């Protein structure tokens, strides 16, 4: 299989500038050896040239950055207008854990190039205008969504008030589960959907792909949550289902979970796992 290479060209202007400065410097060395008078005259020209090149490089880099940012903003707007944000997030969650040597990697994600080609093709078929000649568009788009999701997880995790489940909001409870399953050895990704969508986290380990439904309730959790998680299993292409809560489950929820092989994690069991894997006492 042919290897794919992607080089971020953000610093290419510096390579050009360094080459020009290097050539001019060699010319000065030659003059210093052969003609000292000409050398000193050219030396001051070199100083001016150096200032112009450096200033021009900064200006060009800023111009290119703003142009790329504007292009990325337009792509994101196109994704939103065409209702494709869930497609992008699902692709990241489903295919961002490839382990190939030549994969494109960003943060804790790794993508196969052939799958990236298909992803780019699908988005274009659905109304986006990603470049087919260069990788900049699709990779910038993925970097943006991966970075935003990671930053949200970190920010929400920092704001967690430890020890009491009752102090946690729904998103904070999801982040607690995120940290727990990571400590258990899973690679974990948020689905990007909040509320009763059936799946809040996707966890992968040794071929096992879990969809995790997080229920931060003050009362007992009924079979509706189990039904939502069962539906999410197909949506996120998972082979295991987990419904976790800070509370407890109804009898009907246990009966449905037994039929569909859904793992229910009550607040009591969750507290045990948190103490075992995170060394944190919750209740």
Image (cartoon, helix red, strand yellow):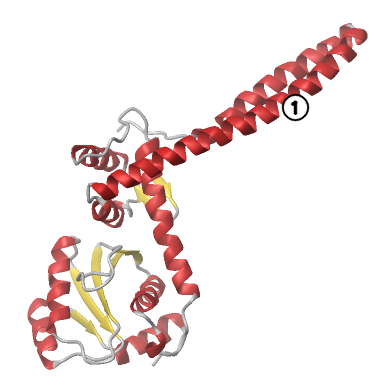
Can residue 103 be seen here?
no
Give the residue displayed 43% in from the left and 65% down from the top. Answer: 152
At mark 1, the secondary structure is helix
Give the residue displayed 25% in from the left and 73% down from the top. Answer: 195
Q: Nearer the viewer, residue 57 or 179?
A: 57
State the image coordinates of residue 276 (x, y, percent, origin top left): 41, 85
In the image, is residue 265 above or below residue 2? Answer: below
260 on left or right of 10: left
Give the residue displayed 30% in from the left and 30% down from the top. Answer: 132
State the image coordinates of residue 169 (x, y, percent, origin top left): 37, 80
Q: State the quadrant of the N terminus.
A: top left
In the image, is residue 200 above or below residue 72? Answer: below
Give the residue pinned by disc 1.
Answer: 51
In the image, is residue 191 above or below residue 224? Answer: above
Can residue 192 be seen here?
yes
Label 1 Cα crowd, 10 Å radius (few <14 / some 14-19 / many 20+): few
Q: Nearer the viewer, residue 7 or 192?
A: 192
Which residue occupies the extreme left position in the image?
A: 259
- Splitting the image into 4 quarters, where does residue 187 fall? bottom left
160 on left or right of 77: right
196 on left or right of 146: left
State the image coordinates of residue 52 (x, y, percent, origin top left): 71, 24
- Splitting the image into 4 quarters, where does residue 222 fall? bottom left
């Amino acid at each position: 299989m042919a290897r794919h290479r992607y080089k971020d060209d953000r610093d290419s202007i510096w390579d050009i500038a360094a080459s020009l400065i290097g050539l001019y410097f060699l010319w000065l060395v030659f003059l210093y050896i052969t003609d000292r008078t000409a050398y000193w005259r050219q030396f001051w020209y070199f100083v001016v040239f150096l200032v112009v090149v450096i200033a021009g490089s900064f200006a060009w880099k800023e111009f290119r950055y703003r142009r790329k940012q504007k292009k990325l903003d337009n792509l994101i707007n196109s994704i939103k207008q065409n209702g494709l944000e869930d497609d992008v997030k699902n692709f990241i969650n489903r295919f961002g854990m490839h382990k190939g040597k030549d994969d494109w990697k960003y943060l804790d994600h790794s993508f196969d190039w052939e799958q990236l080609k298909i992803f780019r093709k699908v988005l274009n078929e659905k109304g986006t205008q990603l470049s087919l000649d260069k990788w900049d568009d699709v990779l910038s788009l993925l970097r943006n969504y991966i970075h935003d999701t990671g930053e949200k997880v970190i920010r929400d995790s920092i704001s967690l008030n430890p020890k009491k489940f009752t102090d946690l909001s729904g998103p904070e409870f999801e982040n607690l589960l995120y940290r727990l399953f990571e400590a258990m050895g899973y690679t974990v990704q948020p689905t990007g959907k909040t509320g009763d969508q059936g799946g809040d986290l996707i966890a992968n380990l040794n071929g096992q792909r879990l969809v995790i439904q997080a229920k931060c309730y003050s009362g007992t959790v009924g079979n509706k949550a189990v039904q939502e998680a069962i539906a999410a299993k197909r949506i996120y292409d998972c082979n295991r289902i987990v419904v976790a809560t800070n509370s407890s489950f109804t009898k009907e929820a246990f009966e449905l979970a037994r039929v569909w092989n859904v793992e229910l994690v009550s607040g009591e069991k969750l507290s045990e796992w948190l103490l075992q894997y995170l060394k944190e006492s919750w209740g």
